[in-house]
Image (spheres, rainbow, N blue to C red):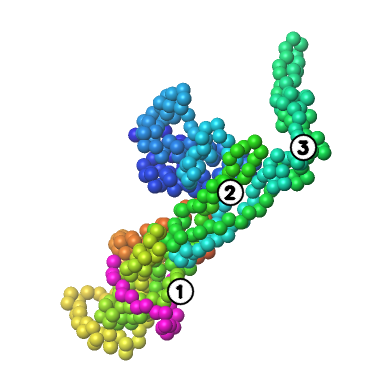
Amino acid sequence: MVRETELYEVLNVSVDADEHEIKRSYRRLALKYHPDKNTGDEAAADMFKKVSNAYEVLSDAEKRQVYDKYGKEGLEKGMGEGGGFHDATDIFSMFFGGGARERGEPKPKDIVHELDVTLDDLYNGATKKVMISRNRFCGTCKGSGLKPGGKRTTCFQCRGRGVLLRTQQVFPGFHHQVQMHCTACGGEGEIVAATDICTGCRGKRAAREKSVLEVHIDRGTSKSDHFTFTGEGNQEPGIRLSGDVLIFLSVRSHPVFHRINDHLMIRCPITLQEALCGFDVPIEHLDGRELIIKASPGQVVHGDSAWSVYNEGMPVKGTGGLQKGKLFVYFDVQWPETLPRVQIDKIVTALNVPEKPNKLGGQVVELSEYKAAGKFKGGKKGMRAGVAGAGSRSAGAGRGREAARGRQAYAEEDEFEDVTDDDDDDDREHQQHSGQQYFRAGPRGFSSNTQTVECAQQ
């Protein structure tokens, strides 16, 4: 039994969340509350620390076990005098790459940037240029703030300390000291004559500049991947190290293809005739090739069934596109609303449907379409059960059985939708298409760049 749940609540995960869920939640929250994205927001900075501390505990199996059993009190006792939490920015750096900086070695804050990309970019690979704004040492004075031959002198007022101590009387007989910045040197501890100040940066040592970085996206790159440009971030006077630039990917939804790991999924409507008699459906792939999804005559395709095409999914990263996942095709059979008697007779004859006599002499009732009040999650087409005059319990039982079949038929599609439906609220700004978009096949004319592929039913 878990004694405390506060750290789980900070990361918005359940107490039985696995390592993957904890990592995914930390990544989303750390990016949301990172100080670089919330300049001057103390509440966001405080939340960033809480999220980082919670992740440090829950991502460590031993610390998590202690916390679950004894709570924060057990962690504090177990850490001893030299224990405690790491710096939040160090945890962020360790999680996203670059490692934690050495203790006592200061470093400017990292610059965090989100790069908008498409699924086509991740499939084919791409090179993107990103413009960032950063503080860099002045090119004229190389960060000294002085003209050639200029010099700094120790402040006469604070004697190089940069601060002054002032004694104030609280009430008669009681005094206390207050520390404040030296007004003569501005807290620098040194004074530069006006004639010695660099004209390029006006003595500030650093200046704001824009820089363009090239991001090389390999084929099969995941949306969870990020890119670290070491030393390409901010520079600050008095700090030896330069900051880093972290670039994360924000992937826009594709109107046709949906991705899960190394696989792709599409939904394709076909006619009832095609479902029964075979079809050739042209599909334009993400690399511009035209695939012909082929079902042979007699190979019956059931509505809402899942089929797959081997080696036509996403490229596996690191293989140069030689190895790919699967392409899953979900067929939606378009049933006609009505049929003329002539066609009915032909179908009965073709399928050799035997006539079923009413042996029991029961009452003949008519069926009418049942339209549920709300969305029916189990099936995409809603319910087509419900006999006129039947009781609510009977209709409910029918809906339950239909729901079970619907959930089974869509188990794999739900997996696709769960992944493409990003938890990060910020990412939802880029969701321009819903997960139920259909692939609309164009005219059945085939170009020279056409490849015919066979489907295998899942």
Q: Of circles 3 and 2, which is in front?
A: 3
435 or 108, nearer to the observer: 108
100 or 242, nearer to the observer: 242
How far from the left and from the top, in percent, is residue 43? 59, 39
207 or 222, nearer to the observer: 207
Magenta residue span:
435-458
Going from N to C along the chain, the mark reached first, 3 or 2, is 3
The residue at which mark 3 appears reads as 150
Asked if the residues shown at circle 3 and circle 1 are in contact, with their CB atoms under 8 angstroms apart, the answer is no
The residue at which mark 2 appears reads as 232
Residue sitting farthest toward the front? 149
Q: Of circles 3 and 1, which is in front?
A: 3
Q: CA distance from mark 3 to mark 2?
A: 29 Å
- Helix, strand or loop for disc 2: loop
Q: In the rendered view, does 50 fall on the left or right side of 411?
A: right
Q: Is residue 351 above or below residue 96?
A: below
Residue type, mark 1 in image: Gly
How far from the left and from the top, in percent, is residue 156? 78, 25
The residue at which mark 1 appears reads as 288
Specify the quadrant of the image occupied by residue 180. top right
| Residue 238's disc number | none
Q: Is residue 362 above or below residue 258?
A: below
Name which residue lies at 72% across and 29% down. Answer: 189
